Amino acid sequence: MKQEHILFIGAGRMAEAILAGMVQTELNMKITVSNQQDTKRLHQLQNQYAVESTEDWRHTVEHADVILLACPPSEHPNVLTSLNPLLTGSQLVMTVAAGIGPSVLESSLPDGTATAWLMPNTSADVQKSMSIYSYGQYVTSEQKLIFEKIVSSIGPSEELSEQQVHQMTAVTGSAPAFLYYFVEALEEAAASYGISNEQARKLVIEMVIGSAAMLDKHRDPEKLRYQVTSPGGATAAGIESLQKDDFTNSLIRAVHATNHRAKELGSSKNLF
Ligand SMILES: NC(=O)C1=CN([C@@H]2O[C@H](COP(=O)(O)OP(=O)(O)OC[C@H]3O[C@@H](n4cnc5c(N)ncnc54)[C@H](OP(=O)(O)O)[C@@H]3O)[C@@H](O)[C@H]2O)C=CC1
Ligand SMILES: O=C(O)[C@@H]1CCC=N1
């Protein structure tokens, strides 16, 4: 079987999480990582994940089947412009950038280029990224198979329209940060009672892991919440306090703010 070759352009936090997930599966895929200038970082990734690296991705483009852009949205115009004359016509160009869908890639690459947009999250590191994705119009069924092989190595996924990936970026890409923020706040509340920071961390993290396992098993957060909330009991007082502080709307506003910023970051008006 032919060994596919994937070239990462960008070797930061998201690229590393994807790499970490990918190398835990026997993918029979050659992986080359590259970035802008941080060669120390490239060597670290090369050693840690047994992948190849290049200090100039331009030399590797012609050998790659898949080119994965994992650089900031603001760098996409530069990278796509340099990529343009180097493409062979049979490659899949994909990005994980917030706000940059396949239609944006298609409009900056040669006619007929196969493109895809993947919105993963950092849980790719433990093969649990809930990823969403959308294909451009020129992706072949063979390229879809390769793409799906990559995506399934980092966790569950769902194909959506380009517009839906824009709308769900906050929910799957960014919301892990909301959850970690929740954990930090609860740790702070726990520590305010005088237990050690280590104890606070253990209590909160293990509680979250247990709750995530319950969600995984039962799939119904409202029912699970009712099981915890004894009528007239202690939890009800806590939930009421959250409701008084507009917890749900506060999260909805955070989702809107995230998506608005993502759209702004990837807007061709601002970038190209
Ligand atoms: N972090 C996350 O949870 C998620 C991030 N994303 C997306 O992933 C992308 C990267 O984010 P993240 O990993 O957090 O960012 P980082 O800042 O951690 O990494 C950015 C990487 O891009 C490289 N880079 C920058 N400019 C260029 C260039 N012109 N050519 C080649 N490489 C370049 C940097 O190289 P150097 O260090 O050498 O400058 C660095 O390796 C973004 O588009 C973001 O929207 C999507 C989903 C989740
Ligand atoms: O913060 C960001 O812009 C990226 C996109 C989704 C998660 N992180």
Image (cartoon, helix red, strand yellow):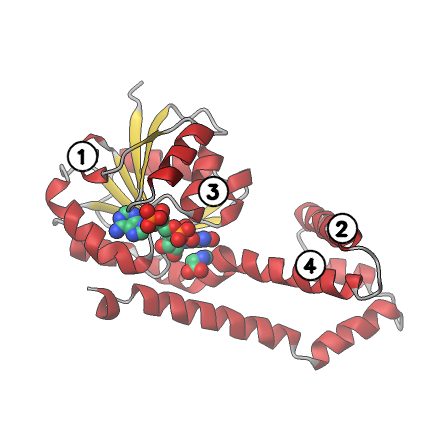
The span from disc 3 to disc 2 (Cα, nearest Å) is 26 Å
- Assess whether mark 4 and mark 1 are in contact (beta carbons under 8 angstroms): no
- Residue 109 image position (x, y, % from top left): 16, 51
- Residue 154 image position (x, y, % from top left): 48, 39
Q: Which residue is mark 4?
A: 221
- Residue 26 image position (x, y, % from top left): 45, 24
Give the side of residue 198 with respect to residue 112, left or right: right
Label 4 crowd (10 A; few <14 / some 14-19 / many >=20): some
- Assess whether mark 2 and mark 1 are in contact (beta carbons under 8 angstroms): no
Q: Which residue is mark 2?
A: 198
- Assess whether mark 3 and mark 4 are in contact (beta carbons under 8 angstroms): no
Q: Which residue is mark 1?
A: 59
Q: Is residue 178 visible?
A: yes
Q: Earlier in the sequence, mark 1 or mark 4?
A: 1
The span from disc 1 to disc 2 (Cα, nearest Å) is 48 Å
Q: Earlier in the sequence, mark 1 or mark 2?
A: 1
Q: Earlier in the sequence, mark 3 or mark 2?
A: 3
Amino acid type, residue under disc 3 in the picture: Ala
Residue toward you, 189 or 245: 189
Q: Earlier in the sequence, mark 4 or mark 3?
A: 3
Label 1 crowd (10 A; few <14 / some 14-19 / many >=20): few
Amino acid type, residue under disc 4 in the picture: Pro
Given this view, does label 4 or label 3 mark the residue nearer the observer? 3
- The residue sitting at 33% across, 39% down in the picture is 39
The span from disc 1 to disc 4 (Cα, nearest Å) is 50 Å
Label 3 crowd (10 A; few <14 / some 14-19 / many >=20): many
- The residue sitting at 33% across, 56% down in the picture is 72
Given this view, does label 1 or label 2 mark the residue nearer the observer? 2
Say which quadrant the N terminus sits in: top left
Amino acid type, residue under disc 2 in the picture: Glu
Given this view, does label 3 or label 2 mark the residue nearer the observer? 2
